[in-house]
Image: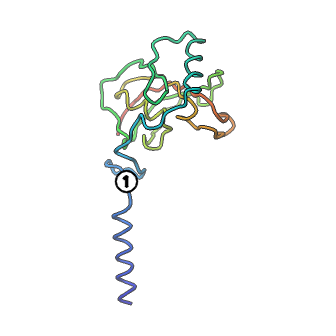
């Protein structure tokens, strides 16, 4: 009985000491050492984003080190989000062919759970800010079909307003 009690106690201590959570107490694990430039889109995907921007006369978009492009509509004046933050954002999403896959919605989102392109973009603005993201497939869902609206290897375009950082 003593061995079972001690074994159970050790298991609990190991579990508690090994379980990861964000510095904000979120239930979602996050990596405080997240590198926004670590995951990079291949050159053919970057070329596709650039061709889209050119074909649609979109000027002022900036190339991120990851290969996505973004255009800051407003930097905002409030708090900045971190990779371990939970945010409230108002956003919409379309495919490069104009198909809407996400009508404008407001949602509470843990930054650590966002696709890389969305996460990288959110980290560039503050509360009250807005950004348009042009996300190549590698920084989105890659070769995965997502529901019935996002086919594999899709470039995604998001319009995001950062409402608040929690």
Q: Position of residue 4 (x, y in %)?
A: 40, 85
Q: Dot 1: within a 10 Å radius of its alpha carbon, few (fewer than 14), some, or many (20 or more) residues?
A: some
Q: Residue at x 44, y 32 (%)?
A: 89
Total number of numbered discs in the rendering: 1
Compared to 141, does 26 lie above or below? below
Q: Based on the displayed image, in which of its 4 quarters is residue 80 positioned?
A: top left
Q: Quadrant of the N terminus?
A: bottom left
Q: Is residue 85 left or right of residue 71?
A: left
Q: Residue at x 35, y 38 (%)?
A: 82
From this viewpoint, which residue is outermost toward the right? Answer: 148
**How far across and down, in percent of the image, does residue 15 sit?**
38, 67
Q: Identify which residue, 45 or 121, lies in the foreground.
A: 45
Q: Image quarter for residue 2? A: bottom left
Q: Position of residue 83 (x, y in %)?
A: 38, 40
Residue at 43%, 32% (x, y): give it.
120
Helix, strand or loop at mark 1: loop
Q: Residue at x 40, y 48 (%)?
A: 30
Specify the farthest residue to the front. 43
List the single residue furthest toward the bottom: 1
Horizontal arrangement in the rendering, residue 78 relative to residue 89 (left or right): left
Which quadrant would the C terminus be assigned to in this image?
A: top left
Residue 17's image quarter? Answer: bottom left
146 lies left or right of 121? right
Q: How is this picture coloured?
A: rainbow
Where residue 53 sits: x, y (%)?
Answer: 55, 15
Q: Nearer the viewer, residue 118 or 37?
A: 37
Task: Reply above or below: 133 against 34.
Answer: above
Q: Where 163 sits versus 18, above or below?
A: above
Decide if residue 37 is on the left or right side of residue 44.
Answer: left
**Residue hosting label 1:** 21
């Amino acid at each position: 009985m003593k061995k079972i009690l001690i074994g159970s106690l050790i298991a609990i201590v190991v579990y508690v000491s090994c379980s990861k959570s964000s510095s904000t107490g979120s239930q979602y694990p996050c990596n405080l050492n997240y590198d926004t430039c670590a995951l990079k889109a291949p050159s053919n995907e970057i070329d596709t984003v650039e061709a889209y921007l050119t074909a649609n006369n979109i000027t002022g978009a900036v190339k991120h080190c990851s290969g996505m492009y973004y255009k800051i509509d407003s930097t905002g004046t409030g708090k900045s989000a971190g990779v371990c933050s939970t945010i409230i954002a108002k956003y919409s999403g379309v495919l490069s062919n104009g198909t809407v896959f996400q009508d404008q919605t407001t949602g509470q989102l843990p930054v650590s759970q966002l696709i890389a392109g969305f996460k990288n973009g959110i980290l560039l603005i503050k509360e009250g800010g807005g950004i348009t993201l042009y996300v190549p497939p590698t920084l989105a869902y890659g070769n995965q079909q997502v529901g019935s609206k996002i086919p594999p290897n899709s470039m995604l375009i998001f319009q995001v307003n950062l409402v608040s950082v929690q």
